[in-house]
Each structure stands twice: as C-alpha cells, then as structure tokens.
Image (spheres, helix red, strand yellow):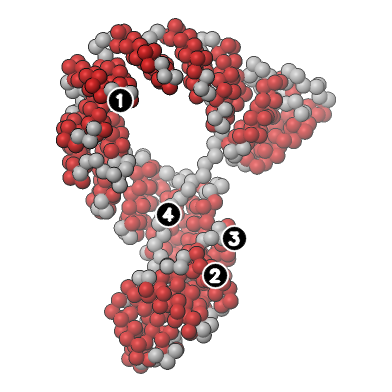
Amino acid sequence: MKKREIIYLLVILILVASCGTTGKQTKSVVSAKTESKETPLSDDNRNEFEYTFIEALKQKMIGNQKAALTLFSKCLEINPNSSSAMFELAKIHSGNGDQTSSSLLLEKAISLEPDNKWYKLLLVQIYQQGKQYEKAAEVYGQLHGKDPENLEYLYMNAAMLSSAKKYDEAIEAYNQLEKRVGINDQISVEKQQIYQVQGKKKEAMDELQKLIDSNPKEAHYYGLLADYYLSEKDDVNALKNYNKILEIDPDNGFVLFSLTSYYRQKEDKEKAWEYIKKGFQNRTVDVETKIQYYVMINSEPDKPFFTEDQINELVNILVRTNSDDYRVFTVYAEYLISKGKLAEAREQLRKVLETNKDNYLIWERLLLVSNDLLDFKSIYTDAEKAIELFPNQPVLYGLKAVACLQLEKFSEAIEILDEGEPYLLDNIPLKIQFDLYRAEANYKMGKVEEAFKAFDKVISLDPENWLAMNNYAYYLSLRNEKLDKAEELGSKAVRANPDNPTYLDTYAWVLFMRQNYTLAKFYMETAIKNGGDKNGTIVEHYGDILFMLGDKEPALEQWKKAEKIGDTTKFISEKIKQQRYLDK
C-alpha cells in the first residue's frame, strides 16, 4: 500500500556556539613561569601541566570542547593559580552559555594578572551580555587607563555608564572624548539623548545646535534636530527643520523618508505617499536606506498604512531604479512570497544567484520555496549545485535527501545523508531530521530493521516527534507486528494532534489491524471531518472499516469515492468489483 507522501518542510535551528577574544594573545600561555602569583611547581608538575595544556589546546582546535574542558580543568588541579588555564576555561564556558562560571574564572585570572587586557576584554563582553553595565564601565575605564590612546575604550566606558544610568559620569566621559576628537555627531547625539532622559531640554537642544553651528550646510544635522522636536511633540519646529533640509538638499533621501515618517504619524496618507514615492524614485538615495524603510513599513502587516497597490508600486520602483543591486530582487522575491506567488518569487531568487552564486542564504531560500511548490526535481538539482559551493552546510544535504525520498531515490538518500553527517556536529535538531529521513529511506528499500532502529533513535532524541511516531506506527500496522507498540505510538501522536487527519487515520488503522473496528470507526470519522475526505487512502480505509462492521453498501460507496480521488491501494478496483475487503 502506498502511504500518502509526507512533505517535509525543513525548519532548522542551527545551533552554533562560538567563543574567542577580540585580539591575539601575545604571551606564552603554557609555561607556569608566566603566572606572576603562582606557587613554584616541581619539574614533574611543570612538565605535566605543559603537556596537559598543549593537549587541551589541540582538543579545542579540533572542536572537541568536552575533552578540552576536562583537560583545562586538570591543568587547574595541577596548578590552581594558572590564569592561562582559567582564561581558556572561561572561553569554553562562555561559548556554552555559562557566563557565571566564565566571569568568576576571569575575575580570578585578572586578580593574578591585572595587566592582561585579553582577560579584561572577554570579561567586559560577558558583563555586557549580562547587562552588568556598571561593572563593564569600570573595566573599560581600567583598559583606557592602561592605554589612553585607545579612544574606543573611552567611548565604551561612556556608553556603559549611560546604560548603567550613571548619566553625569557618562556625560563627563563623553566630554573627555570630545576634547580628543572634536565635535562629533555620534558623541553629540549620545549626549543629547542622555540630557533628554534627564529632562534637560535646553542642554539637549544645545548639543544639536552645536553640531549645526559647526557645519551649517550639513543637512543631516537639521534632521537630528527635527527628530528631536518630533520626539518632544513639537511638530511645528520639526517640520521647519525638515523643510530646511529640502532647501539645502532637495533630493536628500534622509529627509524624504523622515517626512514620510512625519506624515505617517499625522495619519496624512496623501502626503506620506508623496514623499515615500519620491524617496524610492530618487536614484541618489542608497539602496540600503530604501530597503530598510520598505522593511519598516511592512513590519506590521496587520496594520498597513499604505495600500497593497502602493506597496506593489514601491517594490516595482525599487527594482526599476536599482536593478544593478541583487538585494532588490531578494526584496521582490520576499514580496511575491508574501502574496503566495511562489513560482515568480523563485525566478527572482534565481536572478540573484546569476550574479551572487556565493550567497548561501539565497540558495537555502530558493530550495525552501521549491519545497513549498513541491518541486522536488528542482530541489534535487539545485541542492546538488549548492552542495558543490557550500559542502560544509548540512541543511543542504537534508534538503537533497528530502528530494531523493520524494523522487524514490532511496539508496541515494542514504548516501547523501551519510555525506552530510560529519557536518552536523552538535546540531541535535538537524541530526533528528537526518535520522528520520534515514528511517524512511531504509523502510522504502525494505531494510525494515534499520528503519525501525532509526525511528527508535529519533524518538529517543525527541520524545515529542509526532511525525516519527505516526510513520513508525503506520509501518508497524502495515506489517501487522508489534501492534501494541504501534497503538501506543499512534495514541501519543493523536493526543498531541487531535485534529490531524493523517495521525487520526494511522491510529484508526492500527485499531483496525487489532480488530477494534468500532473504535477505529470513531477515529476514522474524526479524520474525515478534519479534511481526510480529500485523501484517497483515508477514504479507502474508512470503507474497509465500514465493511468489517457489516455496513457493506456504505463501504462500497466510500471505495468508489476513494477511487475517484486517487492515491489508493492496488486492490481498490477489485474491492469495488467483488464488493468485499481485500488485502492480498
């Protein structure tokens, strides 16, 4: 019997943990002599430490983080004051998301080596991630104290003080920075925002006016002042400054989109449309600005400001005025996808790949669109091309395996899964998908034992993988074996998905094989009510159940209906002809 084909939409969570520092470490990290506050080690301990440390670094380099963690920990057992081992352990813990352990190790390492900036740079990153802004500011202050010429440290010190709501101290730090670099729009805006939060409106305006006075012909500065007035609900002065920009630079893209936003706030659809259209038509406005604004106005599809026709016009203007930039075709493709025009969207993605074949994300998007179109021949050929370009991307192997399954290239599906296996690393969700595809391919090739082992593996890794449970239960029922297990699996899938007609059909069929026809009828009728009446296999099964319950005329009616729908067993014609259930 041919089970209805299951379309696998690959939604993959690629879990990548990375760690590192912001620069090269310039000192030796192996010798115990580099640790300034260590108790001297014996020669044997020193040799053991150095051997273990080097081995730990090797394991880390080849990606074996677990072994590296064990070895670096052993280094600390040999030498509890090794700041180098603490640093390496801190990086691993940080990469694993354990920021508490990482920060404790780094704080200890810094107490041993107060002048090591790499330790502090990693620690400050962890403080920022944990929103410990005051601590981060303190470390940046220390770094700047040791390296006064590095103005990035001073800037980050000010930014962290601002995030910590130490506003007066932040202003002081920004003022120090301004003395070094001169009047700067980034610094002035940061100060303006702080003053605004503090309610110091005059000081906030003075910062922006200072920018304008420094360069009265810079249109961007008037835009900053206009935005400030707009945030203070002073529409009159906001509009005055926006218009000032147009006097200086009539084609300024910044002000065209700012005025669009202004009139959107005012709910003036006519004026907003006038300026956004000018902005998109303006060839001097960079593509990035146009795309960002397009994304922004479409960020709330449930509350559209512009009409569907206007959005369509903007997309076409974008393509027409910037056809030399591949990104516009990506935007156009996403627009078409949102409208359900998948075939047209795919053509736009292919245009992108004509000039940007090294863009992995476009290849992946193309393949997923083909998946939605159920065009498995295209997935098969396109995935093969993509794998040649990106041989270390496991998602591509998974997508090609899906195509192989649908095209009944089962042995090739196994081959491609084996090829992609080394690139899975610790990506458990994708590993589960691979094992599920392997189970399907093996079953279709008659390798039942291997298939069922793979199903068991999937369910052990993901106890809520209802698709695996459903298919496993169905295949067991077809073979009329382990029906107790099949019933348990089918029951779990149905309880979690009570409206899924495929799962309901599977469970009903397991009950049918156990000769529990009355209960099978209940679940099959539920499947029919939930859309199963459009599936030939489900309708045929319904007829089989009715026949076993003695309802021969209704059974015959369902078999005839199933034959018209298609996708039935090879026995359907004989069932109708002989007016009885057949399975051999």
Local SS, label 2: helix
Residue mark closest to the camera, 2 vs 4:
2
Rendered-image quadrant of the N terminus: bottom left
Identify the residue position indicated by label 2 in the image: 489
Which element is circle 3 on? helix
Amino acid type indicated by mark 1:
Lys
Instruction: Residue 549: give x, y in percent of width and height.
Output: 44, 89
Query: Which residue is identified by label 1?
Result: 233
Q: Which residue is mark 3?
A: 460
Q: Which quadrant: the C terminus?
A: bottom left
Mark yes or no: residue 432 visible. Answer: yes
Name the one closer to the observer, 340 or 131: 131
Location of residue 202 with respect to 293 vertically, above or below = above
Q: Which residue position is annotated with label 4?
A: 10
Q: CA distance from mark 1 to mark 3?
A: 59 Å
> In the rendered structure, which amino acid carries the disc numbered 2?
Leu
Q: CA distance from mark 2 to mark 3?
A: 13 Å
Asked whether the beta carbons under mark 1 and mark 2 sit within 8 Å of each other, the answer is no
Q: Nearer the viewer, mark 2 or mark 3?
A: 2
